[in-house]
Amino acid sequence: MSFLDDLLKMLSTPAATPGAIPGVLAVVPGIGVPLGAGSSVPADRAANALKLRVACDAVLVDPRWRPDQPWPGATHCNGAAQQVANAMGCRDLDGLMASRQVAKMEATPGWVPDSAERAVTHATRGGLAFAAMAAIPHGHIVAIRPEPMEFSSTWGCLVPIVSNVGKKCERCKLSGGFLLADRPRIKFYLWGVT
């Protein structure tokens, strides 16, 4: 087992929450998820934010997600999104292409469409959030990193920092992972309670 595996295992062990009943659903308007998927306890939020940061960093260096493999032009944003989601305890995106992942997030209870600002707040509190766009033949999806927004001179506004796996594998501003022309079609999805 690698250091990363050990760290993720340690961070995925739910901390004791006073008054929590194991297996009981925590309900937030529009969201019902098992306890441990997110938390309003500050120590749990910090641990989950660290777990998310580690998962976001891991996909950027994972050789499976390098562009142009196994053939020229191949990209793997969907596999990277699945890996980040799995690290945070979510299996909803498994085995799907990016556009199908978007459709799944749109249709599955537990996922909430929201704004870029709320996605960043959710991620910094240890919740899972993605920016995504459905398209033909396939869309694009990036994990929102638990970091403050930064100004994009290309888009002229504050944007989330993301782990972008596509033609490049990099930590970048959202504007580095999507074209300006695609901006109106990008949606943000939140999963878990924070």
Image (cartoon, rainbow, N blue to C red):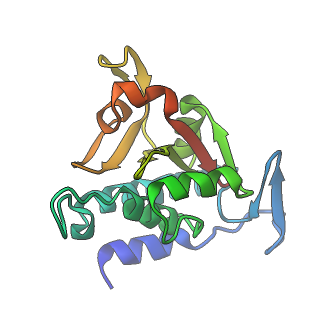
Question: Where is residue 45 shown, x and y percent of the image?
Answer: 59, 52
- Residue 87 lies left or right of residue 165; in this view the side is right
- Residue 35 lies left or right of residue 126; in this view the side is right
Mark count: 0
Residue extending furthest top? 156
User: Would residue 193 be visible to someone looking at this image?
Assistant: no
The residue at the point 41 percent across, 30 percent down is: 182
Decide which of 32, 12 is in the foreground and name it: 32
The residue at the point 20 percent across, 58 percent down is: 67
User: Would residue 95 be visible to someone looking at this image?
Assistant: yes
* Image height of 57 relative to 9, above or below: above
**The quarter of the displayed image where residue 118 is located:** top right
* Image height of 67 relative to 62, above or below: above
Decide which of 43, 30 is in the foreground and name it: 30
- Residue 70 lies left or right of residue 78; in this view the side is left
Residue extending furthest bottom? 1
Question: Where is residue 193 shown, x and y percent of the image?
Answer: 69, 52
Question: Where is residue 52 shown, x and y percent of the image?
Answer: 46, 56
Decide which of 106, 23 is in the foreground and name it: 106
* Image height of 177 relative to 23, above or below: above
* Image height of 9 relative to 178, above or below: below
Decide which of 178, 85 is in the foreground and name it: 178
Q: Identify the image quadrant of the N terminus.
A: bottom left
**The quarter of the displayed image where residue 3 is located:** bottom left
Question: Where is residue 23 shown, x and y percent of the image?
Answer: 80, 74
